[in-house]
Amino acid sequence: MATNRRTWLKQVGLGIAGVGLTNLTSSYASPQTEALINGLAAINDTPILLRSNENPYGPSPMARSAIADHLHVSNRYNWNIISELIAALSKKNNVHDENILLGAGSTEILDMVARYAALEKGNFVIADPSFDYWTAPLSTSVLSKIKVPLTADKKIDLAAMQKAINQDTRLIYICNPNNPTGTICERSSLVKFVNEVPRKVIILVDEAYLDFTTQQSLSGLINDYPNLVIVKTFSKIYGLAGARIGYGIAHKTMIDKLSTFPSAPNNSISVLSRLAAMASLKDEKFIAETFSLNEAARQYTVAGLEQLNLSCIPSHTNFIYFSLANFKKDFFQQLTNNNIQGTKIYEEQGKWTRITVGTMQEMQQFIKAIQ
Ligand SMILES: Cc1ncc(COP(=O)(O)O)c(C=O)c1O
């Protein structure tokens, strides 16, 4: 256990920063807290997590220090940090502060948009497969789901999506790049699409993985299209999935509407997560490193999968969509035997699954496990 705790402290960076938990466990922690910390260490020592598209290198060193150095300010609400973060995000995205809405993960923003769309009866349009966990409350309530198949090369079919819109459509969701397929829509096609979709339809563009590409965000369009909402997250390239921080970018009128859903808008994120997010924005070195480490590990993995005769969809993200049609063994059993967590079959036909790109070492273990 002692080794586990040391490993965990090293991983979270607090040991290095010389702050907090080492002292906390030795001098202040109750047996229950110590057990919790040891439990977390045990979790960290267990499987290779290639399931949820997290950043295996994060949080960034600057974010770790920000958290460690500011534990003591958690006793105050620190409202000023919210406005500083909003200002940093509006600057980064070249919009105004009034165009930003913070959430505890982008899931919270997706949820607000869903609830806003569901104020009236109708339908919503989504590609299939795409990231759809956030739609669960929609499908069971007033909005029916119109699923639009991807193209043969697993791209979002923007023309078909547009055609699927009818007079009752409240919302259309575009995940760019798309989860789980890793494919990307050309920016010019997206701009045309946004322009052609009727203004009464909310266009929700999820840019969770856009940081793994060189494509420019659609944030520049929000002033011309009050029906456009862009969602972003700190959970992926910024490595802060557990810190729960994301945001929406939209026209002020849309932000005002979405802000009516939480009882205190912009206030669901802890002070430490806000500080971590601000520090992450400054840690350009870490982002650049993650970007290139991801590219290298992804290239290695695709080559390994193709060598096993498993076809892969070209990915613009930190995950790979590939077919198990030619895989002779039980893929998920092979993963389990090797203490690796994958996801599921997304499309029965063609047996398509997804694997997150971890570190190079993790991907070497993954390829070895399925050979
Ligand atoms: C496309 C997409 N959008 C949003 C999310 C949710 O991210 P968050 O952690 O910001 O809630 C995920 C998480 O995997 C995702 O893949």
Image (cartoon, rainbow, N blue to C red):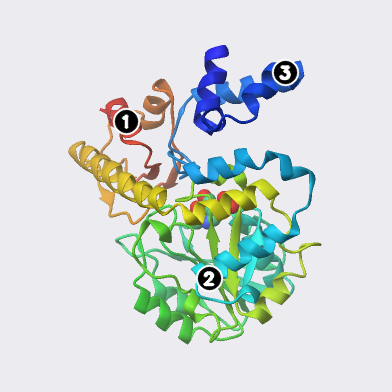
Q: Is residue 319 above or below residue 246?
A: above
Q: Secondary structure at mark 2?
A: helix
Q: Position of residue 364 (x, y in %)?
A: 28, 30
Report how far apart the C-alphas of labels 1 and 2 lie in the structure.
37 Å
Report how far apart the C-alphas of labels 2 and 3 lie in the structure.
43 Å
Farthest left residue? Answer: 307
Q: Residue at x 61, y 59 (%)?
A: 135
Quadrant of the image containing the C terminus: top left
Residue denoted by label 2: 91
Q: Position of residue 103 (x, y in %)?
A: 66, 58
Q: Of circles 2 and 3, which is in front?
A: 3
Q: Residue at x 32, y 30 (%)?
A: 361
Q: Relative to residue 75, is residue 181 drawn left or right?
A: left
Q: Amino acid at mark 3?
A: Ser
Q: Of circles 1 and 3, which is in front?
A: 3
Camera sees residue 35: no
Q: Residues within 10 Å of mark 3 (few under 14, many from 20)?
A: few
Q: Position of residue 19 (x, y in %)?
A: 61, 31
Q: Position of residue 178 (x, y in %)?
A: 42, 59
Residue denoted by label 3: 27
Q: Secondary structure at mark 1?
A: helix
Residue denoted by label 1: 361
Nearer to us in this view, 47 or 159: 47
Q: Residue at x 78, y 52 (%)?
A: 77
Q: Of circles 1 and 2, which is in front?
A: 2
Label 1 with label 2: CB-CB less than 8 Å: no
